[in-house]
Image: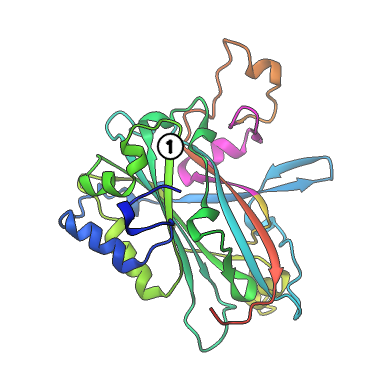
Amino acid sequence: MPDFFGSRFDACVMGVGEALHVLDDAGSMVLQKDGAADDMRSQFRLFPLVAIDGDRAEFIDPHRAAPSFRGDSSAPDIHAKVELVAFNAGDLPTAEFSRATLRLDVGEGASALPGGSALNWAIVAGLNLAAAGTDRPDRAGHDFNGCFARRPIEIRGGAALLRFEVVAHPEPSWWRRIFSRLAKGDVGELVTAFGFPAIVPQAVRILDTAFSQFDAGTTLFRSAKMPFALTESARDGMTMDTPGVEVASLPQGLSLLVPQQHFANVVEVSPKYWMGYGALHPGGATAAEINDSEYVNPLAQIPYAILRTRLEAVKLSGQF
């Protein structure tokens, strides 16, 4: 387990107050982003990998996907585990910025228990852009489940809100202190992450202030909060049987995250994720072509991330 703050922590789960204290020690941070966060072209889209016709799979629009579970009264809730399988820097400004901070929020959606605050699970990860490269995007992979001490993400009602953001920036002193294993030059540890489990929206806003502000930083890509149905019951509740309403669903398995300005280029080549090579390649590419010394992967210069979600239908007690 990475030792982020000396002997103060023996696990990568920590409190919001503790994190802010460390950041405050390093001094205040001033927001000086380049405005790309408000540009729709930098918004990412999510495409789950879904079996088609039983003999092939495609990354499809989530509105075409179906949830993996019914979500009946015996198991209306979801336990989720998230893994960053690969992160490809593509043509992002890795020469100008040596580091990036990745933010993934998973929150309860419209089907959360009435009368209670929706809970959020926030993950913050440090990425060594210079070492990530485009040859093996899977080298930047990380199992985020460890961020919550192997506790699954708990989603009451089976409806979730997902937000993803990557900000590139120089390496400030507080970043070096938090992501200490990267600072030691361990090339094999490209991502070091920690998490905030089951926090209320007010704490999420504190994280927004503390971790989304970087001196001379630039947003590489991000999303607004996107609602997803993880069960059929949650999907039905979100549509309320209203004609003309389409709900995005997130089945378990692999999903592709790609900035909107690039998604058409990616989807049109029907990409496949080659796990042995750790990267996306066009669907028509063969192993022989990929291993050819003159082969050029047209997806190598496109920034993308691949997530693996493992879901389990459960019945939560509502107590923590």
User: Picture quarter containing residue 180?
Assistant: top left
The residue that appears at 22% across and 44% down in the rendered structure is 172
Q: Is residue 41 left or right of residue 109?
A: left
Q: Position of residue 81 (x, y in %)?
A: 60, 57
User: In the rendered image of this protein, does residue 69 appear above or below residue 84?
Assistant: below
Q: Which region shows up in magenta?
A: 254-279
The residue that appears at 61% across and 39% down in the rendered structure is 267
Q: Is residue 3 left or right of residue 120?
A: left
241 drawn magenta? no
* Secondary structure found at label 1: loop
Q: Nearer the viewer, residue 285 or 130?
A: 130
User: In the rendered image of this protein, does residue 156 appear above or below residue 69?
Assistant: below
Q: Position of residue 102 (x, y in %)?
A: 40, 49
Q: Position of residue 203 (x, y in %)?
A: 36, 71
The amino acid sitting under disc 1 is Leu
Q: Which residue is mark 1?
A: 190
User: In the rendered image of this protein, does residue 23 appear above or below residue 129?
Assistant: below
Pointer 1: residues within 10 angstroms few (<14), some, or many (20+)?
many
